[in-house]
Image (cartoon, rainbow, N blue to C red):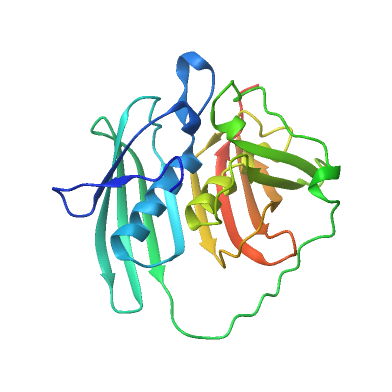
């Protein structure tokens, strides 16, 4: 179990709960809030637990954010599906107030696997500089739960390669990939401090790896909004996931 994994209700089918902690939060200490990627990770874990199937795809809308110490309830509602696949809606509330909505498809069918996209050639994570984020980082919060290293950054073309891994060893899961994919707005100097509106995640594999390489390409900025795509790879180049996100640029 991870620090965000919810616990199943003993009375309500499809309901899961977790209490927000500082390890789930970002932002100044007086206004700490649960990062959207953590909320998606919670919802993904709940959906996998409820269906007994692995995540294929999920898209989440960040309507609001839970605060530290709030009780977060996650309701998984079956929409359609059969033996191989299930489609669900997941409603996330904090102290009974709606904060996020997610749709997801889970399951698999037998078939061959072929990867087309290639991981770029980068330096080893141990040789790359540490990445800090003073805008959202405080002692003991979510940022301190991860080791991040900048392998490459070119703001002119909107491209960043970032190594990331949990400080405390944990397996690669769809929930973890949902969380790490939400660092997209930290990939460009002009998006840091922005606000994520959504995140769409497609899981290709959950192959074991120590470090994850997040390759983020900003698609563009338009009228105060940033759009971008992230591919995540194992250290030896196997594709883990692809994700896309919309975020509000920080106010000048």
Q: Residue furthest left?
A: 11
Q: Residue furthest top?
A: 30
User: Which of the pair 188/78 is nearer the observer?
Assistant: 78
Q: Residue at x 25, y 62 (%)?
A: 78
- Regarding residue 155, the answer to whether it shows in the image is yes
Q: Quadrant of residue 67?
A: top left
User: Which of the pair 141/242 is nearer the observer?
Assistant: 141
Q: Position of residue 172 (x, y in %)?
A: 56, 56
Q: Residue furthest bottom?
A: 111
Quadrant of the snapshot with the C terminus: top right
Q: Quadrant of residue 112?
A: bottom right
User: Which of the pair 180/49 is nearer the observer?
Assistant: 49
In-image side of 59 versus 138 (left or right): left
User: Which of the pair 24/193 is nearer the observer?
Assistant: 24
In-image side of 49 versus 185 (left or right): left
Q: Is residue 27 above or below residue 14?
A: above
Q: Residue at x 54, y 27 (%)?
A: 141
Total numbered badges shown on the rendered structure: 0
Q: Position of residue 182 (x, y in %)?
A: 56, 44
Q: Is residue 214 above or below residue 63?
A: below
- Regarding residue 152, the answer to whether it shows in the image is no
Q: Position of residue 192 (x, y in %)?
A: 66, 31
In-image side of 118 versus 205 (left or right): right
Q: Position of residue 108 (x, y in %)?
A: 43, 76
Q: Residue at x 67, y 53 (%)?
A: 210
Q: Is residue 84 above or below residue 95?
A: below
């Amino acid at each position: 179990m991870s620090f965000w994994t919810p616990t199943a209700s003993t009375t309500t089918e499809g309901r899961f709960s977790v209490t927000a902690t500082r390890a789930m939060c970002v932002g100044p200490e007086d206004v700490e809030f649960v990062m959207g990627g953590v909320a998606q990770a919670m919802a993904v874990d709940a959906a996998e637990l409820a269906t007994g199937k692995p995540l294929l795809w999920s898209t989440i809308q960040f309507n609001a954010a839970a605060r530290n110490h709030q009780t977060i309830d996650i309701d998984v509602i079956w929409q359609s599906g059969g033996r191989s696949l299930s489609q669900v809606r997941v409603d996330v509330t904090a102290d009974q107030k709606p904060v996020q909505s997610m749709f997801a498809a889970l399951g698999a069918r037998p078939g061959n696997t072929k990867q087309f996209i290639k991981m770029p050639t980068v330096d080893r994570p141990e040789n790359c500089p540490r990445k800090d984020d003073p805008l959202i980082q405080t002692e003991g919060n979510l940022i301190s739960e991860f080791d991040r290293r900048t392998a490459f950054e070119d703001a002119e073309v909107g491209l960043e390669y970032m190594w990331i891994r949990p400080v405390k060893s944990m397996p690669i899961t769809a929930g973890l990939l949902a969380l790490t994919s939400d660092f997209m707005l930290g990939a460009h100097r002009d998006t840091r401090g922005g606000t994520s509106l959504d995140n769409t995640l497609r899981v290709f594999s959950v192959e074991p790896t120590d470090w994850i390489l997040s390759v983020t390409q900003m698609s563009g900025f338009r009228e105060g909004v940033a759009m971008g795509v992230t591919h995540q790879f194992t250290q030896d180049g196997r594709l883990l996931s692809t994700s896309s996100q919309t975020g509000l640029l920080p106010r000048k």
